[in-house]
Every structure is written in structure tokens, then in C-alpha cells.
Image (tube, grey):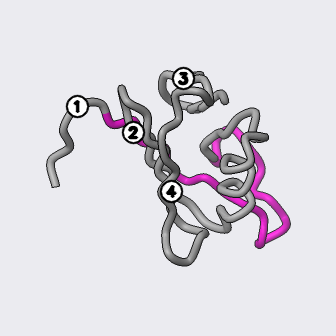
Amino acid sequence: MQILCVLGPSHAPSYRYLMDVVFSKDYGSRIELVYSFMMVRIEGRNLAPVAAAILDGTCAFIQDFDAREFATPADQDAPMIEKITFIVGKEDK
């Protein structure tokens, strides 16, 4: 799965390295992908279809939304990734 970032480096870790998928209780505002070498935090809205595709292993890529690059989706129920954070090593809480 490719993790594409408009204003930063992109990554393409293999599904075989994905150890866990953590998602918010409402299943729509936050997803965390846990790998042995990093964690990827995905924040946005209406992310349930994204989480489902990741859990099914059918998500080819995710990409963060940037209004300078893309038109705002007309469908307000469409998934929108607002922020992708790569965490390597310990995170300060």
C-alpha cells in the first residue's frame, strides 16, 4: 500500500509488514497502522471505507487532502484524509 503525502515524503510499506490496524470507536476519524518499524496515524473524516479496505488488504494507496492541490469533494460523506503522521521510535505523549 502506498502512503502518499502531498507536502512530504511518501512511503510504500508492504501489507506483509502490517501488524495491526487501530481505529477510533466511531470508525471514522482516526486510523493507526502499526508496523514493526513505524506507526502511521491517519486522521480525517468518514474514514470507515478506508479502514475497511485496509483491513481487507485491498487498499492500493491513501493520500492526504490538500486544498491547494485538489478540489474539495462535493460529497460531504466522502472519506477525507486531513493528516498523515509517520511515527518512528518513541512518541512523546
Residues under labels 4 and 2: Cα distance?
13 Å
Magenta includes 90? no
Q: Nearer the viewer, residue 29 or 20?
A: 20
Type of amino acid under label 1: Gly
Type of amino acid under label 2: Met
Numbered mark located on residue 11 in the image: 3
Predominant secondary structure, magenta span: loop
User: In this rendering, which labeled residue sits more in front, label 3 or label 1?
Assistant: 1
Report the residue at 62% width, 30% height from top: 15
Type of amino acid under label 4: Glu
Residues under labels 4 and 1: Cα distance?
20 Å
Numbered mark located on residue 39 in the image: 2
**N-term-proximal mark, 3 vs 4:** 3
Label 1 packing within 10 angstroms: few (<14), some (14-19), many (20+): few
Report the residue at 84% width, 68% height from top: 75
Q: Which residue is mark 1?
A: 89
Asked if the residue under mark 1 is in contact with the one under mark 4, i.e. CB atoms within 8 Å, the reply is no
Numbered mark located on residue 43 in the image: 4
User: In this rendering, which labeled residue sits more in front, label 4 or label 2?
Assistant: 2
Asked if the residue under mark 2 is in contact with the one under mark 4, i.e. CB atoms within 8 Å, the reply is no
The secondary structure type at the circle numbered 2 is strand
Q: Nearer the viewer, residue 64 or 29?
A: 29
Q: Position of residue 61 (x, y in %)?
A: 71, 34
Quarter the N terminus occupies: top right
In the image, the segment drawn in magenta is 66-87
Label 4 packing within 10 angstroms: few (<14), some (14-19), many (20+): many
**N-term-proximal mark, 2 vs 1:** 2
In the rendered structure, the answer to whether residue 57 lies left or right of residue 26 reads right
Report the residue at 29% width, 30% height from top: 88
